[in-house]
Image: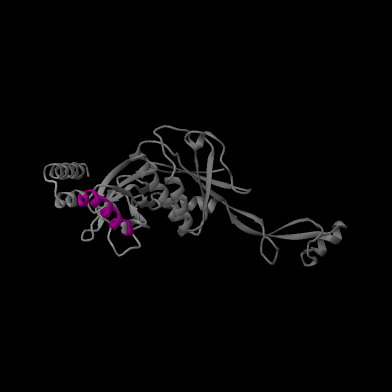
Amino acid sequence: MAGRRILYAVLVGAAVLFQIFFRFYLSTFVLVLILVLPILSLLLALPGWMGSMASVVPQAPLITVGGSARFGVLLYHSSFLPLIRPRIRLRWTNQLTGESGESKITVTARKPAELTVTATHCGRLVCQVEKAVCCDLLGLFPLPVRKGPERAVLILPAQLELEGKEELAAGENAGTVLRPRPGGGPGEDYDLREYRVGDPLRSVHWKLSSKKDELVVRETLEPQQAAIVVTYDHFGPSEELDRTFAQLWALSRWLLQQDRPHHIQWASPVTGVAEDRAVDSPNALLACLELVFSTPAPLEGRSILDGALRLPGGGKVRHLHVTPDGVEGGGR
């Protein structure tokens, strides 16, 4: 654009000299025409510029570490006239690791623009239009183009075969306890207790009540598995975090395949405040990872093991801690 302005200034200077040395109507016409040209150029570019917007659209919302995130660059405008020499500056950031970069793109009708970013680590890769401009027909005036919203791609961990499934399954069986069944009903296992207001009469143990001279009811029990809390530490080098998230991804998917809802917990690396998300479906797992990958992970921070776990509900809880090298299991 600077070169075009210099060229136009030279052209105006030549027209002024032509007017000075040749005082005829032609020289005046040439001078006026050259002075009016920028205005005409701007007016002709306005219909295509008004209502225009530059936006990015990811080709796929989910990719795996080692793959490539591709963002298509789109230009919207309400006029049939095209935008003149649109130039767009894109910026991308991995919110988990802090990696970032930018790219300058010139969009043409014959060459659709695309930004490709290699996914070297897990995270949430956010891409946005940092600046977008077009210009008039002569290329003298920059016209800012409205920017669309930022878009993100979730970079999932690599597929990993979970080790120690037999030990995990054995721990599941050991964690089963008997608890009162809501609403009662028939069952082989039951407990005896004193009658409370609201208990159905069919649950009264009449024979034992007659001996004790007070009402005793059967409370049906059913096996209930311990709640599972999966924890990990939200700090460390990117390579170690990739391995940690690969273990977490494999463990959580295995638990869901076993019809075992669970909670994923981690501590804020700065404040140490524990975060908790319930995972009962693949969509809930993805939502949890999106929140996790949106939080920056420093090299050092506070461990979730330094504080007390936030136990969901009451009763027995099984605690599984994920590290880069595997899963550490235990009961609480």
Farthest-out residue, left: 21
269 in the magenta segment: no
Residue 167 in sight here:
no
Left or right of 1 on screen, residue 196:
right
User: Which percent across, then down, holds residue 274?
Assistant: 53, 40
Left or right of 290 on screen, residue 155:
left
Q: Nearer the viewer, residue 252 or 21?
A: 21
Left or right of 312 on screen, residue 48:
left
Q: Which residues are magenta?
A: 32-47
Q: Quadrant of residue 196?
A: bottom right
Residue 158 in sight here:
yes
Q: Quadrant of the C terminus?
A: top right
Q: Nearer the viewer, residue 96 or 168?
A: 96
User: Which percent across, then down, holds residue 74?
Assistant: 31, 57
The residue that appears at 75% across and 61% down in the rendered structure is 218
Q: Nearer the viewer, residue 249 or 213?
A: 249
Q: How is the image coloured?
A: one colour
User: Which percent across, then down, holds residue 243?
Assistant: 36, 44
Residue 271 in the image: above or below residue 57:
above
**Overall secondary structure of the magenta section:** helix
Residue 180 in the image: above or below residue 14:
below
User: Which percent across, then down, holds residue 131?
Assistant: 33, 46
The residue that appears at 23% across and 60% down in the rendered structure is 109
Left or right of 284 on screen, residue 45:
left
Residue 254 in the image: above or below residue 275:
below
Q: Quadrant of the N terminus?
A: top left
The residue that appears at 39% across and 36% down in the rendered structure is 236
Q: How many marks?
A: 0
Farthest-out residue, right: 213
Q: Nearer the viewer, residue 146 or 6?
A: 6
